[in-house]
Amino acid sequence: MDKILELENVTKEYKNFKLDNISFSLEKGYIMGLVGPNGSGKTTTIKLIMNLLSKNSGEIKVFGLDNSLDEKAIKERIGFVYDDNIYPLGLKLSKIALLIAPFYKTWNQELFNQYMKKFQLDPQSSLEKLSKGMKTKFAIVMALSHKPDLIIMDEPTSGLDPIFRRELLEMLQEIIEDGNCSVLFSSHITSDLEKIADYITFMDKGRVVLSDTYVNIVENYRLVKASEEIIKKERNKFLSYRCNSFGGEGLCKNWHSLQNEYPDKIVLEKPTIEDIMYYISKREEVEC
Amino acid sequence: MEILISNSSQKPIYTQIADQIRKHILTGRLKDGDTMPSIRALAKELHVSVITTKTAYQELEREGLLEAVKGKGFYVSAKQGEALKEQKNVQIKKGLQEIIEESKALGISLEELIDLVKRMYS
């Protein structure tokens, strides 16, 4: 398998935050979603990959190359969408493209024009006049117009309406269809990831809690609803749980054994990514 | 070939896809040697992840209903489908036998049983 992105034991320390021993990898041709609560380290991780921050230790390889030694060669092939606007506000969109294009050998002006049309962006309007969502659309156009082999997006869908979000997801699927391009994107809107992500990496408090295929994650975990008595008795089988006056629910990994033991007394549900994120962030000292 | 996915179903999406392709093979809508859409094209069309369609195809490959040809893609292998159909027929006959015997024991007549089946079938 061709690994397009590999992080191994990456650590970055701040005064009051530590990205602790992060490892995960992404294969060629697949989409990975990076999820986690605010402040869990998603943006820091992405910035480390982009070499916008320097790591304290560990190894980051993109296209099999070291991300700081071969930064230039790597960035040619990455399409990056920041969570904030990075382009000069006073300029026309066409002017910005003119400025940025020479940095990429593979810049495709025709593709740029096509995307601008598709996203209904006027090349003659100036960036400051655009709404937040339109700015994001423009950033996406800029990221895609040099035919990248890896697309990295930090919260791309957060300012976008549901219609465009769906269009963006469809476009990403079209782009990866030939199997040569991969996508890593962080998002709070977990339903977006549920639709198209092949892999999900959960982060919490600066650590990777779980990184696996979406299919495996949804198969391995169940939301278990049961009486407080059962939950308290089997508490070590739960990642975490919460109880109310009518019973309780929790996230469970070895749910088959519970199902066998209490066939008529518990309700099992397929968890959503949001459920998993919630219960993972609520857990105290449970390993996955 | 229709494949309809329900997001609210308890069945995983890859199982839903595999079930429906299997049905198309067993009912003859997909024939021996037919080319299947590529894993990636199917994922794009259905708006599901690539691994989902891959898992579905792998399940059918294990059952012998699809055949993977390296570098070319997946083909329908309906011969295995015939055998599977035969096998399922035997299962159904066995199940029916049990139901008939139980009905006899409870005094349910043939007409009543047929009526019940008719109502439940539709």
Image: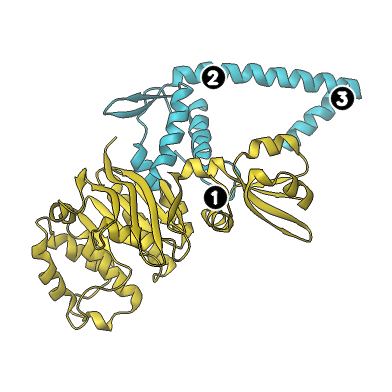
Chain colours: A yellow, B cyan
Q: Is residue A23 above or below residue A243?
A: above
> Residue at 26% of width from left, 68% of height from top?
A139
Q: How many marks?
A: 3
- Please report, as a chain letter, where disc 3 is located: B
On the rendered structure, is B7 left or right of A157?
A: right
Q: CA distance from mark 1 to mark 3?
A: 41 Å
Disc 1 packing (10 Å; few <14; some 14–19; many ≥20) = few
| Label 1 vs label 3, nearer the camera | 1
What secondary structure is found at the residue carrying circle 1? loop
Q: Which mark is residue B7?
A: 1
Disc 3 packing (10 Å; few <14; some 14–19; many ≥20) = few
Q: Are marks 2 and 1 in contact (CB under 8 Å)?
A: no
> Residue at 21% of width from left, 43% of height from top?
A64
Dot placed on the residue nearer the N-terminal end, 1 or 3: 1
The residue most toward the right is B107
User: Where does label 2 land, which residue?
Assistant: B84
Q: Is residue A172 visible?
A: yes
Q: CA distance from mark 3 to mark 2?
A: 32 Å
Q: CA distance from mark 2 to mark 1?
A: 28 Å
Residue A14 x %, y % = 36, 65
- Please report, as a chain letter, where disc 1 is located: B
- Please report, as a chain letter, where disc 2 is located: B
What secondary structure is found at the residue carrying circle 3? loop
Q: Is residue A212 above or below residue A157?
A: above
Q: Is residue A204 above or below residue B2?
A: below
Q: Which mark is residue B109?
A: 3
On the rendered structure, is A277 left or right of A111?
A: right
| Label 2 vs label 1, nearer the camera | 1
